[in-house]
Image: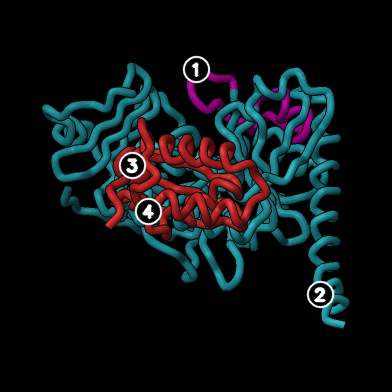
Chain colours: A red, B cyan
Amino acid sequence: MHVSFSDCVRVAPDVLFRLVSDEAVLVNLNTEMYLGLNPVGARMWSVLSEATSIQAAYEQLLKEYEVEPSELRRDLEEFVAQLHAHQLIETRPAA
Amino acid sequence: MPMDNDSSHRYCVYGIAIASDSPLTLPQYSHDTLGRVECLQAPAPLFQKAIESIVFDSRSDSWYRHAVTRDGSTYVAWDAIGEFVVAADGRRIVCRRDEGCCAESFQVYLLGQALSFALVQQRFEPLHATVVVVNDEAVAFLGGNAFGKSTLAACFLEAGYRLLTDDLLNLQESGDGIRAYPGPPRIKLFPRVASCFLHAIANGVEMNPDTKKLILPIDAHRSCSRPVPLKAIYSLAAPHDASRRRDVTIETLSPRQAFMALVSAAFNRTLTGRQRLERQFGMMGRVTDLVPVKKLVYPRTLDRVEEVRDAVLDDLVRDVRIARSSPIAALAMLG
C-alpha cells in the first residue's frame, strides 16, 4: 500500500479502541480480529487519529521521540499500512 | 419451545439461579443471584423436531454437533452424553440424557458447555479457568484443555486451599474489583493426578467413554460456595511450550498481553457477533485494568507441581507487599 503523508487517517467504522495503561487494544467488529499495540503503537494511533494529516502526526511524533526522521517516516508508513490491511483505519485526502 | 414443566429443584451455580425439573448435584438456591436459567428434560422427538432440516456448524463431527435452530435457539449435542437446546435469550435449557450416560457425566456437560451458551446469551463473559481460594480471594488458572489447570488446583486442595470452580469461571464487576463466582463442587482429574493429590479416586466417575478423566465430588470443607474477590490470574503456558522448561517462571503480562490472554481464554467461542465482541472488549478491558494477569510456565511433571504451587503462593505474597508499599511512596513524594 502506498501511504501519502498528505492524507488524513480516520478510524474505520466498527472499530473499538481501548487504552490499557500505556498500551492499547483494538477490535474490528466486522472481521472479529483483535490487535494489541505497544506503548509506541498506542501513541502513534492516538496522534494519527487526531491529526489533520499523516504529515502532521509525523511532525508531532518527531517532537516526542528521539528518533531519526527517516526511521520514524518508515515506521509510520509501515504502521499505517498495517492498520489499513487490518481494516482498522481509512485514509482520505486531508480537507 | 413451549413446555409443561415443574422446575421444583432450585440451585445456584456461577452466581446463576438454576430451576430444574430433576435433581442436580449443586448448592441450594440463593437469593443473591445474577441471572436465572431453567433446566428441563424432554424426550428425543422434541430434539428431532428442533433440528429438522437445519444446517450444522462446520465444526460438528460424529462426537459433537452444534447448530442454530429456526427460532434462534442453540442446539448442541455430544455423542453418548446427550443433547441440549438453549433458548435464544439464555433463560431455558431443554435437555435429554443418552441412555448409558451417568448423571454425573451428563451434569458436567449440562453445567459446563451447555450452560455456557445460556451465560453468553444472558450477556456474561465466562472464562476457561480453574480457580482456587487463597486467603478468601480467588486465584484463577487460565488455559485450554490439557493445560494443567485442574492438576494445579488439585495440588492447592491437597495443601488445604478450597476450590471455587473447575473449568468455567463467571465474573462480575463489583465496586472497585471483580468478583469470581463458584461453580459446581467437583473437579475433573486423571486417576493418577487424583490419586496423587486427593488420595481418593473410588468415588470418581468417568467423564465420557473416550477419556479416563474422572469427575470427583469436592466436599463442603474443600470447596467455596460464595463469590470472592478475584486476586490474580495466571495464564498457563500451552503444554508444548512448557514441555522443555526446567524452571518455574512467573512473569507479569503487559496490559496488552493480559487483555489478549483473557480474550483467548473465552469459554465459549462458538457464539460470536458484534454484540458479544463489544461486550467482551469492555469486560476483558475492565478485568485487565483491575486484576494482575501473569504468565506461568513450568515443567509438566507431576513431581514439580508442588513447587509450582509454592511459587504461586510466594508470588501472591509479593504482590501484597508491592500494593502496601505504594501509599508510603506517594506520601514521601508529597513531602
| Marks 2/4 same chain | yes
Q: Report in which chain the residue with disc 3 lies.
A: B
Q: Report in which chain the residue with disc 2 lies.
A: B
Query: Which residues make up the magenta segment?
Result: B190-212
Query: Pointer 4: what residue?
Result: B278
Mark 1 or 2, nearer chain start:
1
State the image coordinates of residue B277 (x, y, percent, origin top left): 37, 48
Furthest toward the left, the residue is B53
Residue sitting nearer the eye, B190 or B20: B190
- Please name which of the two marks, 3 or 2, marks the residue nearer to the observer: 2
- Please name which of the two marks, 4 or 1, marks the residue nearer to the observer: 4
Query: Pointer 2: what residue?
Result: B330
Q: CA distance from mark 2 to mark 4?
A: 36 Å
| Marks 3/2 same chain | yes
User: Decide: marks 4, 3 in contact (CB < 8 A)?
Assistant: no
Q: Amino acid at mark 1?
A: Asp
User: Decide: marks 3, 2 in contact (CB < 8 A)?
Assistant: no
Determine the image quadrant of residue B309: top right
Q: Please give the label number shown on residue B210.
A: 1
Quadrant occupied by the C terminus of chain B? bottom right
Q: Report in which chain the residue with disc 1 lies.
A: B
Residue sitting nearer the eye, B45 or B265: B265
Q: CA distance from mark 3 to mark 2?
A: 44 Å
Q: Is residue B210 magenta?
A: yes
Q: Judge the density around disc 1: few (<14), some (14-19), many (≥20) Cα neighbours within 10 Å.
A: few
Query: Pointer 3: what residue?
Result: B272
